[in-house]
């Protein structure tokens, strides 16, 4: 079976597009070949800045003949219907067959397509792939109509086997296929021919081109570490930057330089960010001091002076960049040491959202809520409020204006310079966390209080103005905020009752802001800020206004996603969500974990079946009789040993479950509930519920009600699957 080699050679492809382009090329070509009737053994795609390559092994030499039968309209159908069928099949009326059908005589088209040679199919598939390639951005050049990410220069398309190689003939917008390619732009610019993939990869290597991006990444990292180790330093790992740089060079040559002494006093994160964003440099750290002292740049060529000229030029540009950073840093320190009042005033003019006020308004709400949450997480209320008022002030700093990704982190440095307690400074750094599923969760109580307040304010505010996520759209990152609340609460075991404490606190915060803005209370007793109306009352036990009412449902949906990764079943979560206190997330997860463990035992799984049987019989009887059998079963009416044993088992289980539920010992409660499995099974085996004796029947139905009550006191087992 022949092998196929394709190379699309162009001007430099942006590094960020290469991984997706490799996957798209492989999928489009292989799917097209398979759809046309060819099969293959394996395929692999590669990329360099100037080429996309696809190698396919074990391709069949031709497709199999295809015979397709297609049913058409009735022979008595209108002429227009018959003509449409003929057009779709490409046949004439004489070529159609007439066959008997349930509805009479109908036309059938028998379409036979002979097998096609692989080169014909490849040419069609590759032509369509090139013309319809899904680049995020593309361009036209010259007088042609083809769109490509950068001007396409050549197409290599080669079929090879033991007998030799043949070029698959095709032409796209005047670019004819061939068997030639080029090496490195500067080190080996000449054209050379290839015969198969192995020959292609070997000649590229000799022409100073490393085809595999993973191999380029490994070479860059190895050489960078070697250079740093020789100087007693270490390279700061940055996988994203490594992937990007590997997409910028075909023949990587790492070079290490030093940062000027004038800039070593800058925070390490500032140096790293400036070098990464502006220069694509790797940071080099002194392992003894943790200070960033050097950088590694990756050249795309070999020079006679071993890169010294390149390094000198890079250091000159870097010095200019770091001079800007130093200027920002020194100016920001002046404001920070003065108490940051200048930044606080500036945030009054920065709109957070036109219906939710300015950033200054938002900070006031977060501060009030952080003070309320602080005792629940073991934080000092005064420190939590102070941290919340300072945490976002760095948004007005020059450094964050240049590098927005440093917000929070710079706030920590500025808070320290302002003489704030370390807990306040750390809260400025951590209050955005966690941003992603792999981010660490803050554990310092002040940081936890401010982080929770920040996210809860975001959720309630946007919920109140009806700006909720829809489908795949989530412009305000509310799903991320909800997951952040969940991880903060669960990671720190925070017993935060959202409906009883957090939202009323926000209500008061909105009210305070409104009073400062001479707003008026609404007719229901709640407060408005712009279009916001949070609650109808802060009295314990009352619910939030309807458009905020489903915020807890949204949090529960996010919780299901989070717990699914921990192998807790969705129906188990639903069974626990139906219980009181479902806005206490640690309590909810504790209950779900215990229920999941119980269901994984034989007694637990069979108990659910017994409970559902009891519940179904009882529900049907209550509907038929029009009464609720909840007035207590009496053991004196028990007629069988199994019935009396069930009474005793229920008494024993109830005695264990009730105190266990009060102390939130769900494991003990679930185990006690699981012990009911055997007596319930024995009861149903030996006892007829709907007996002719109505007194006994009612007593047994009341007994079933007791089974239902005891089981439902632990979790809503009706929500479980099966």
Image (spheres, rainbow, N blue to C red):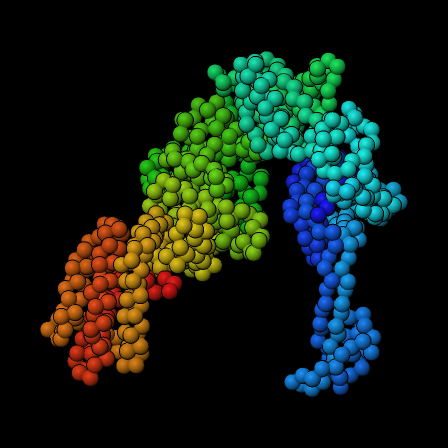
- Residue found 72% across the figure and 38% down from its top: 197
- Residue found 74% across the figure and 34% down from its top: 199
**Total numbered circles:** 0
Looking at the picture, tell me which residue is in the foreground, 287 or 28.
28
Q: In which quarter of the image is the C terminus?
A: bottom left
- Residue found 26% across the figure and 75% down from its top: 628
- Residue found 82% across the figure and 78% down from its top: 93
Across and down, in percent, residue 301 comes to: 73, 23
Q: From the viewer's perspective, is 232 left or right of 609?
A: right
Q: In this view, does 365 lie above or below 110?
A: above
Across and down, in percent, residue 459 comes to: 48, 49
Q: Given the current orientation, which residue lies at the most extreme right position?
A: 143
Q: Is residue 614 above or below residue 137?
A: below
Residue 525, picture quadrant: bottom left
Q: Given the current orientation, which residue lies at the most extreme left position?
A: 636
Q: Is residue 529 above or below residue 213?
A: below
Across and down, in percent, residue 305 comes to: 73, 13
Q: Is residue 402 above or below residue 469?
A: above
One can see residue 147 in this view:
yes
Q: From the viewer's perspective, is 156 left or right of 494?
A: right
One can see residue 626 in this view:
no
Across and down, in percent, residue 9 comes to: 78, 38
Looking at the picture, tell me which residue is in the foreground, 261 or 183.
183
Looking at the picture, tell me which residue is in the foreground, 269 or 239.
239
């Amino acid at each position: 079976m022949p092998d196929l080699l394709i190379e699309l050679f162009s001007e430099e492809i942006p590094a960020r597009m290469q991984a997706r382009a490799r996957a798209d090329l492989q999928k489009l070509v292989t799917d097209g070949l398979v759809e046309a009737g060819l099969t293959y053994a394996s395929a692999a795609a590669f990329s360099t800045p100037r080429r996309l390559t696809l190698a396919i092994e074990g391709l069949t030499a031709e497709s199999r003949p295809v015979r397709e039968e297609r049913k058409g309209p009735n022979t008595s159908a209108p002429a227009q219907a018959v003509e449409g069928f003929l057009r779709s099949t490409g046949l004439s009326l004489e070529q159609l067959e007439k066959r008997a059908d349930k509805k009479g005589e109908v036309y059938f088209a028998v379409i036979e397509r002979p097998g096609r040679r692989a080169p014909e199919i490849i040419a069609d598939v590759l032509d369509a792939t090139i013309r319809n390639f899904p680049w995020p951005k593309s361009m036209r050049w010259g007088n042609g109509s083809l769109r490509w990410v950068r001007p396409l220069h050549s197409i290599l398309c080669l079929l090879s086997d033991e007998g030799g190689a043949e070029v698959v003939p095709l032409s796209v917008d005047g670019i004819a296929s061939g068997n030639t390619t080029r090496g490195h732009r500067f080190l080996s610019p000449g054209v050379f021919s290839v015969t198969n993939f192995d020959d292609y990869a070997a000649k590229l290597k000799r022409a100073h081109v490393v085809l595999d991006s993973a191999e380029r990444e490994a070479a860059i990292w190895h050489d960078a570490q070697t250079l740093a180790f020789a100087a007693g330093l270490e390279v700061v790992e940055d996988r994203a930057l490594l992937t990007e740089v590997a997409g910028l060079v075909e023949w990587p040559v790492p070079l290490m330089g030093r940062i000027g002494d004038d800039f070593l006093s800058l925070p390490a994160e500032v140096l790293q960010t400036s070098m990464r964003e502006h220069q694509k440099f790797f940071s080099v750290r002194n392992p003894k001091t943790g200070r960033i002292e050097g950088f590694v740049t990756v050249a795309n060529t070999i020079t006679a002076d071993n890169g010294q000229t390149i390094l000198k030029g890079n250091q000159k540009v870097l010095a200019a960049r770091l001079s800007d950073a130093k200027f920002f840093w020194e100016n920001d320190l002046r404001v920070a040491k003065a108490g940051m009042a200048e930044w606080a005033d500036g945030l009054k003019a920065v709109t957070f959202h036109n219906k939710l006020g300015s950033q200054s308004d938002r900070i006031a709400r977060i501060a009030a809520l952080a003070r309320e949450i602080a005792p629940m997480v073991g934080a000092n209320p005064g420190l939590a409020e102070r941290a919340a008022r300072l945490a976002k002030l760095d948004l007005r700093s020059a450094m964050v204006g240049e590098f927005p990704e440093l917000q929070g982190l710079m706030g920590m440095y500025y808070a320290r310079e302002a003489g704030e307690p370390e807990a306040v400074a750390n809260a400025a750094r951590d209050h955005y966390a966690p941003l992603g599923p792999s981010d660490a969760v803050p554990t310092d109580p002040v940081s936890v209080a401010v982080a929770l307040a920040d996210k809860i304010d975001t959720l309630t505010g946007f919920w109140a103005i009806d700006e909720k996520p829809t489908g795949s759209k989530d412009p305000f990152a509310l799903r991320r905020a909800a997951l952040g609340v969940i991880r903060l609460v669960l990671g720190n075991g925070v017993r935060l009752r959202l409906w009883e404490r957090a939202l009323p606190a926000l209500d008061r915060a909105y009210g305070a802001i409104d009073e400062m803005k001479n707003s008026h209370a609404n007719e229901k007793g709640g407060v408005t800020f712009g279009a916001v109306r949070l609650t109808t009352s802060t009295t314990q036990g009352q619910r939030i206004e309807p458009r905020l009412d489903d915020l807890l449902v949204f949090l529960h949906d996010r919780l299901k996603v989070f717990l699914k990764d921990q192998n807790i079943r969705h129906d188990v979560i639903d069974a626990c969500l139906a219980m009181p206190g479902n806005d206490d997330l640690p309590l909810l997860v504790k209950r779900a974990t215990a229920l999941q463990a119980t269901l994984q035992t034989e007694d637990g799984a069979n108990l659910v079946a017994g409970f559902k049987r009891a519940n179904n019989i009882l529900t049907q009887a209550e509907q038929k009789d029009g009464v609720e059998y909840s007035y207590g079963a009496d053991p004196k009416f028990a007629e069988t040993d199994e019935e009396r044993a069930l009474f005793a088992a229920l008494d024993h289980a109830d005695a264990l479950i009730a105190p266990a539920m009060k102390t939130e010992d769900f494991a003990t409660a679930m185990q006690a509930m699981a012990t009911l499995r055997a007596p319930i099974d024995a009861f149903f085996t030996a006892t007829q519920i709907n007996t002719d004796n109505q007194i006994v029947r009612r007593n047994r139905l009341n007994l079933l009600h007791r089974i239902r009550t005891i089981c439902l006191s632990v979790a809503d087992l009706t929500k479980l699957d099966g």
